[in-house]
Image: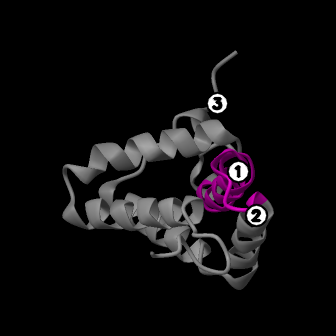
């Protein structure tokens, strides 16, 4: 019994750029933005809850895009895609820039300040 080739997708640099663009754009789709906002609000700025609620939504958004390119529709697919992007970051400045943008989207999702302001100044 042969293993399925979909488990080890390979992308060219150009394809990786395209997929990264789609992933970044997916976070701007109103439905996905609303899902992320709802998860952030449910987490109430608690980092443990952020990891439990926000990170899975962000992972799902990425999965929805990358599954069309042969990555499995589980967390493992996102990890494989991240490794592939990491490999191309050193070879392609555009991929490196898009990777930074994606990471900033994810970090922003996990570090949103509490509603109503931050720490009062004295």
Residue 92 position, x and y percent, is 21, 58
Viewer-closest of 102 and 117: 117
Q: Which residue is mark 1?
A: 56
Q: Please give the residue where the numbered disc 3 appears in the rendered image.
A: 4
- The mark tally for this picture is 3
Residue drawn where x is 29% and y is 66% of the image: 97
Q: Is residue 64 magenta?
A: yes
Across and down, in percent, residue 100 comes to: 34, 62
Name the front one of labels 3 and 1. 1
Of marks 2 and 3, the one in the foreground: 2
One can see residue 9 in this view = no
Q: Residues within 10 Å of mark 3 (few under 14, many from 20)?
A: few
Check residue 39 in the rendering and tell me which mark sits there, or answer none: 2
* Position of 99 relative to 29 (above/below): above
Principal SS element in the magenta part? helix
Circles 1 and 2: CB distance less than 8 Å? yes
Residue 82 image position (x, y, % from top left): 45, 46
Q: Earlier in the sequence, mark 1 or mark 2?
A: 2
**Magenta range:** 43-66
């Amino acid at each position: 019994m042969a293993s399925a080739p979909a488990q080890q997708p390979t992308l060219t640099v150009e394809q990786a750029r395209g997929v990264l663009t789609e992933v970044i754009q997916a976070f701007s789709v109103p439905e996905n933005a609303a899902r992320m906002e709802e998860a952030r609000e449910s987490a109430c700025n608690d980092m443990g809850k952020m990891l439990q609620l926000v990170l899975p939504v962000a992972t799902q958004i990425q999965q929805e895009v990358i599954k069309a390119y042969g990555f499995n529709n589980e967390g493992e697919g996102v990890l494989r895609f991240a490794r592939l992007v990491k490999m191309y970051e050193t070879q392609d400045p555009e991929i490196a820039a898009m990777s930074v943008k994606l990471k900033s989207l994810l970090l922003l999702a996990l570090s949103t300040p509490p509603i109503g302001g931050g720490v009062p100044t004295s």
